Image (tube, helix red, strand yellow):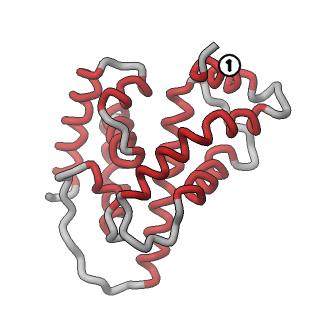
Amino acid sequence: MGEASDLTRLLAEAGEREDAWRVIFALVHDELRKIAGAQMARERPGHTLQATALVHEAWLRLVGDSLPIFETRRHFFAAAARAMERVLTDHARKVLAEKRGAGRERLTLSGVDLAGSDDPERALELSDALEKLEREDPRSAEVARLRLYTGLELDEVASALGVSERTAAREWAYGRARLTQLLGA
């Protein structure tokens, strides 16, 4: 049985197995660490948050005190991407609160590294724009989050979401255009 089907099975059994979350964490840790590493590589030099800390903080937010129910591998990794986004957004808010009064720059979506901007205000503006996009078009927002916060390529996004690469590309094109509009870039 493959790793993907093992994860799907474990997610289904999570409420019934006492050790399920420990086993799931061991199974997905390397993949989450790779995603976090890619995200942190796009962050500003000297960022105080490390990839391993991002994985652990996101895991705590993902699982928390209650045992969430994830229906599929896709659902799990989408939730993981959101948890990483929240960790980075909260971190940006904290940094911004510490240095109020800094000059503002316009946001652009010229590359996938926008989520890794070294400007906390930019990160917060992007997070707000993603929330608005999600209300308008949830799948485009999900594709955008996976591209921006995990650094996945379109073929990887398509695989994670269980859609064709063409669909993922269309959703990304729309999401990127709408985010650019929302950000006033």
Q: Quadrant of the C terminus?
A: bottom left
Q: Residue at x 85, y 33 (%)?
A: 18
Give the residue type that dot 1 points to.
Answer: Arg
Q: Is residue 161 above or below residue 55?
A: above
Q: Quadrant of the N terminus?
A: top right
Mark 1, residue position:
9
- Compared across the picture, whether 160 is left or right of 133 comes to right
Q: Quadrant of residue 143?
A: top left
Q: Quadrant of residue 46?
A: bottom left
User: Looking at the picture, how far across and down is residue 41, in whole percent?
Assistant: 39, 57
Q: Is residue 127 above or below residue 174?
A: below
Q: Residue at x 40, y 23 (%)?
A: 159
User: Looking at the picture, how far across and down is residue 77, in whole percent?
Assistant: 52, 35
User: Looking at the picture, how far across and down is residue 21, in whole percent?
Assistant: 74, 37
Q: Residue at x 16, y 58 (%)?
A: 184
Out of 32 and 99, give the one closest to the viewer: 32
User: Looking at the picture, how far across and down is residue 148, in whole percent?
Assistant: 34, 47
- Compared across the picture, whether 150 is left or right of 73 comes to left
